Image (spheres, helix red, strand yellow):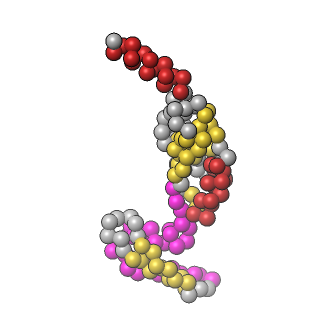
Amino acid sequence: MQEKEIVCIICPVGCRVQVKATPGDDERLQVEGNECGRGKKYALEEFTNPTRVITSTVVIRGALLPRLPVKTREPVPRHLIFECLKELDRVEVESPVQVGEVIIKDVLGTGTDIVATRSMENISNHEHRREKEAANAD
């Protein structure tokens, strides 16, 4: 029998949920310790197919800052986290970039995109805007 304790993160209670799988052709999962149905659902998903939203940064050229924050639009299988990070390590984008802009489409065939979580303008646009603001302040 495979067994795992999972701390539920769906609400602040943080139930310690035990999931047990009985071996056989019709493997059955038992869930105990959850105080609500959402905890049971979370524990079953975490036991059978754990996923995570990945947050990271990529190199951006021509922007005020050297790195652009990005994330997966949807959670990806946990076992692919390090492969996704390797993909992100190879990415360089050119400014300007808008929040929500797709940086990598369908990362690793997961069906989810890597998107920018911040807009970054081109540094020359930024300097031009600052000069304009300074001139208007006079």
Count of residue discs: 0
Q: Is residue 8 left or right of residue 90?
A: left
Whether residue 36 is visible, yes or no, is no
Q: Is residue 55 left or right of residue 110?
A: left
Position of 46 relative to 18 (above/below): above
Q: Residue at x 45, y 75 (%)?
A: 6
Q: Where, by quadrant of the figure, is residue 24 drawn?
A: bottom right
Position of 131 relative to 47 (above/below): above
Q: Residue at x 53, y 54 (%)?
A: 54
The image quadrant where one finds the C terminus is top left
Magenta-span inclusion, residue 37: yes
Magenta-span inclusion, residue 67: no
Residue 97, given in percent of the width and then of the height, sits at 54, 33
Residue 64, given in percent of the width and then of the height, sits at 52, 32
Position of 131 relative to 112 (above/below): above
Position of 83 relative to 115 (above/below): below
Whether residue 45 is visible, yes or no, is yes
Residue 129, given in percent of the width and then of the height, sits at 45, 20
Q: Where, by quadrant of the figure, is residue 85 drawn?
A: bottom right
Q: Residue at x 38, y 64 (%)?
A: 10
Q: Residue at x 44, y 68 (%)?
A: 42
Q: Which residues are magenta?
A: 25-53
The image quadrant where one finds the N terminus is bottom right
Q: Nearer the viewer, residue 44 or 136?
A: 136
